[in-house]
Image (tube, helix red, strand yellow):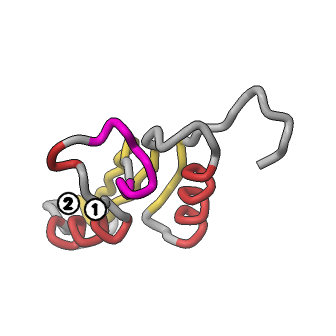
Amino acid sequence: MNNENSLLILDTHIHLWNPALGYRWLRGDLLRPYTLRDLHRALERQLPLGPITRAFVILVEADRGKDSAETREHLALAASDPLVAGVVGWLSLNHSRRY
């Protein structure tokens, strides 16, 4: 397929989590880790899908707790994996420490 006809998809709302680290809201089938590796495997099964040949995601924090650890982890994933195009994180607006 030539580049003129190929498309990409950007999923703007992806959560990753490990229930062992928190996430009190998780219930039922969600009570298992969902990792970037899981996402890669799912995409490998789906792509290419017609003209869609590439995918990118925005990671969104999943309310693990009121600290920036989850956000820092997502930023590290974004720095190391080209699948991750961006991060929507949590940061306390009342804290003077720089993250």
Residue drawn where x is 55% and y is 51% of the image = 70
Q: Which mark is residue 68?
A: none
- The residue beneath circle 1 is 6
| Neighbourhood count class around disc 2 (C-alpha, 10 Å): few under 14, some 14–19, many 20 upward | some
Do the residues under discs 2 and 1 have CB atoms within 8 angstroms? yes
- CA gap between label 2 and label 1 equals 5 Å
Q: Position of residue 40 (x, y in %)?
A: 30, 69
Residue 87, above or below 46: above
39 magenta-colored:
no
Considering the whole magenta stretch, tell me its main secondary structure.
loop
Q: Where is residue 60 in the image (x, y as percent from the top left)?
A: 46, 44
Does 67 sit left or right of 33 as displayed?
right
Q: Position of residue 72 (x, y in %)?
A: 62, 55
Q: Which mark is residue 51?
A: 2
* SS assignment at label 1: loop
- Identify residue type, mark 1: Ser
* SS assignment at label 2: loop
Q: Position of residue 59 (x, y in %)?
A: 45, 50
Q: Which residue lies furthest to the top in this view?
A: 94
| Neighbourhood count class around disc 1 (C-alpha, 10 Å): few under 14, some 14–19, many 20 upward | few
Residue drawn where x is 14% and y is 61% of the image = 50
The residue lying toward the viewer, choosing from 87 and 3, is: 87
Q: Quadrant of the N terminus?
A: bottom left
Image: magenta residue range: 17-26
Residue 40, above or below 55: below
Residue drawn where x is 21% and y is 65% of the image = 42
- Identify residue type, mark 2: Pro
Residue drawn where x is 29% and y is 42% of the image = 26
The residue lying toward the viewer, choosing from 75 and 49, is: 75
Q: Which quadrant of the figure has residue 46?
A: bottom left
Does 57 sit left or right of 50 as displayed?
right
Does 77 sit left or right of 31 as displayed?
right
